[in-house]
Image: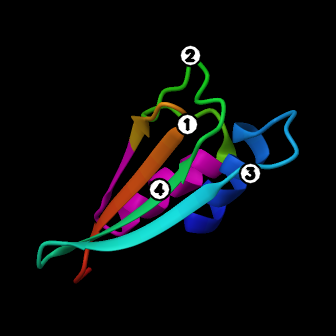
Amino acid sequence: MVNELITNAAKYAYQGQSGGKIWVTVARMGDDDVSVSVRDEGAGLPADFDLRKPKGFGMRVVGFLAQQLKGSLAVRVRDPGTEFLVTIPRHV
């Protein structure tokens, strides 16, 4: 999941630029969950992006893996950029 989210950020967030930053954060959420965040400061998501109906194979895989781990996938619009947050139970 993380590899796909990093790849997507590198591929789409900074198109036409020589580079940009991507942050990966892993944190415990209370006693029961772990969150993984992948964030960039790029161009943001297209207006028609729908996390529930991803068009690309990679985002479908990320969603499927989150489901398989009994977790959740969320997207946050940042100014600038985008953050994807995967939250999974520690004991799957």
Q: Which numbered disc covers residue 10? A: 3
Residue found at x 40% / y 38% = 76
User: Which residue, given by chain and number where applicable, does mark 2 sit on?
Assistant: 47
User: In this rendering, which labeled residue sits more in front, label 1 or label 3?
Assistant: 1
Q: Rate crowding at label 2 as few (under 14), some (14 to 19) or many (20 or more) other CA atoms within 10 Å.
A: few
Task: Give x and y (percent) for residue 92.
Answer: 26, 80
Question: CA–CA distance between discs 3 and 4?
Answer: 21 Å
- Asked whether, in this view, residue 37 is left or right of residue 2, the answer is left
User: In this rendering, which labeled residue sits more in front, label 2 or label 1?
Assistant: 1
Q: Rate crowding at label 4 as few (under 14), some (14 to 19) or many (20 or more) other CA atoms within 10 Å.
A: some
Residue found at x 39% / y 53% = 85
Work out whether mark 2 precedes mark 1 in sequence or the reverse, and give the earlier one. Answer: 2
Asked if the magenta segment contains residue 64, the reply would be yes
Work out whether mark 1 precedes mark 3 in sequence or the reverse, and give the earlier one. Answer: 3
Question: CA–CA distance between discs 2 and 1?
Answer: 13 Å
Task: Give x and y (percent) for residue 62.
Answer: 53, 56
Which contiguous range is marked in magenta?
Answer: 58-74
> Residue type at mark 2?
Ala
User: Which residue, given by chain and number where applicable, does mark 1 sit on?
Assistant: 81
Kindly state the secondary structure of the residue where label 4 is placed. Answer: helix
As displayed, is residue 60 above or below residue 68?
above
As displayed, is residue 1 above or below residue 26?
above
